[in-house]
Amino acid sequence: MTDLTAVLLCGGKGERLKPFTDTLPKALVPLKGEPLLYHLLRYLAASGVGRFVVCVGHKAEAIERFIEERREPSWEIACVNSGEASMTTRILDARP
């Protein structure tokens, strides 16, 4: 199943997770010492997913920096920054 690609929507503002999201994007809020995004990437990779498209927007720079610093060598990850676009636009931007 390594030919699978997961599309992860990580562009939301995380309004319901305040005050954690005052300084961090929602995807980087820690759970057991690791960002939520890292847990998700590891789980999907363990399930056979080899490619990831991470749709970013709000606080995108922090997520992009995290991916560059923490990506595993076997993960193929592309970030697509749609700015403050809607979820639908983020999904459409991920298609290419």
Image: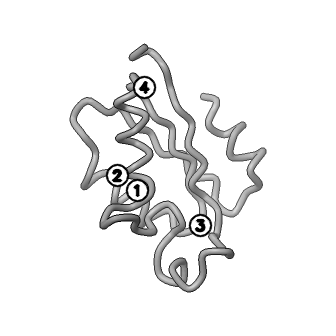
x%, y% of residue 12? 64, 62
Quarter holding the N terminus is top left
Q: Secondary structure at mark 3?
A: loop
- Contact (Cβ within 8 Å) of mark 2 with mark 1: yes
Instruction: Tell me how far mark 4 sits from mark 1, CA to CA.
Output: 20 Å
- Contact (Cβ within 8 Å) of mark 2 with mark 4: no
- Contact (Cβ within 8 Å) of mark 4 with mark 1: no
Q: Amino acid at mark 2?
A: Ile
Q: Secondary structure at mark 1?
A: helix
Of mark 4 and mark 1, the one earlier in the sequence is 4
Of mark 2 and mark 4, the one earlier in the sequence is 4
Quarter holding the C terminus is top right
Where is mark 3, residue-wise?
58
Q: Amino acid at mark 3?
A: His
x%, y% of residue 58? 59, 66
Of mark 1 and mark 3, the one earlier in the sequence is 3
Q: Amino acid at mark 1?
A: Glu
- Contact (Cβ within 8 Å) of mark 1 with mark 3: no
Other residues around mark 4 within 10 Å, as few (<14) / some (14–19) / many (≥20) = some
Where is mark 4, residue-wise?
49
Of mark 2 and mark 3, the one earlier in the sequence is 3
Which residue lies most toward the front here?
Answer: 32
